[in-house]
Image (tube, rainbow, N blue to C red):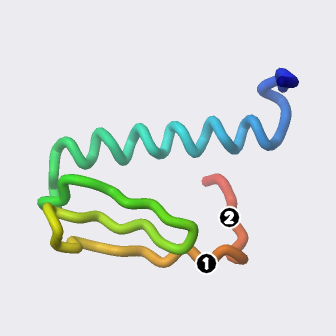
Amino acid sequence: MVMRTASDHDTREALRVLEAIQALQRWLLEQPMGADGPYLSATSLVLVQGEDVVASVALPANAPWTAT
């Protein structure tokens, strides 16, 4: 395994993703929409409560992503 530095673009992006997942986890614990779990696939992010879909967002694979 090759260790990368934090200055590596891919590593920085991965850290931003992990921080976003942590923020989503905190948000879900507060359950402002009644959602109790996220499901992430290659094409969508879905928030569910039990077996019911609370919200979903399409994630097109070819969409450009930028960090804000």
Q: Quadrant of residue 3?
A: top right
Q: Nearer the viewer, mark 2 or mark 1?
A: 1
Residue occupying image coordinates x 57% and y 67%: 42
- Tag on residue 5? none
| Percent of width and height locating residue 32 | 15, 56
Taking 34 as reference, is 10 above or below it?
Answer: above
Picture coordinates of residue 48 (x, y %)?
23, 64
- Which secondary structure, mark 1? loop
Q: Does the residue at mark 2 contact the one at mark 1 (Cβ under 8 Å)?
A: no
Q: What residue is rendered at 79% in x and 42% in y?
A: 10
Q: Is residue 3 above or below residue 49?
A: above
Q: Can you tell which mark lies on residue 65?
A: 2
Q: Secondary structure at mark 2?
A: loop
CA neighbours of label 1 inside 10 A, class few (<14), some (14 to 19), many (20+)? few
Q: Which quarter of the image is occupied by the N terminus?
A: top right
Callout 1 amino acid = Pro
Local crowd size for mark 2, using a 10 Å CA cut-off: few (<14), some (14–19), many (≥20): few
Q: How many marks?
A: 2
Q: Is residue 46 above or below residue 62?
A: above
Query: Which residue occupies the foreground of this view, 42 or 29?
Result: 42
User: Which residue is painted at 22% across and 73% down in the image?
Assistant: 53
Q: In the picture provided, is 48 more to the left or to the right than 10?
A: left
Residue 20 percent location from the top left of the image:
48, 45
At label 2, the amino acid type is Trp
- Residue at numbered disc 1: 60
In x, y percent, where is residue 36? 19, 53
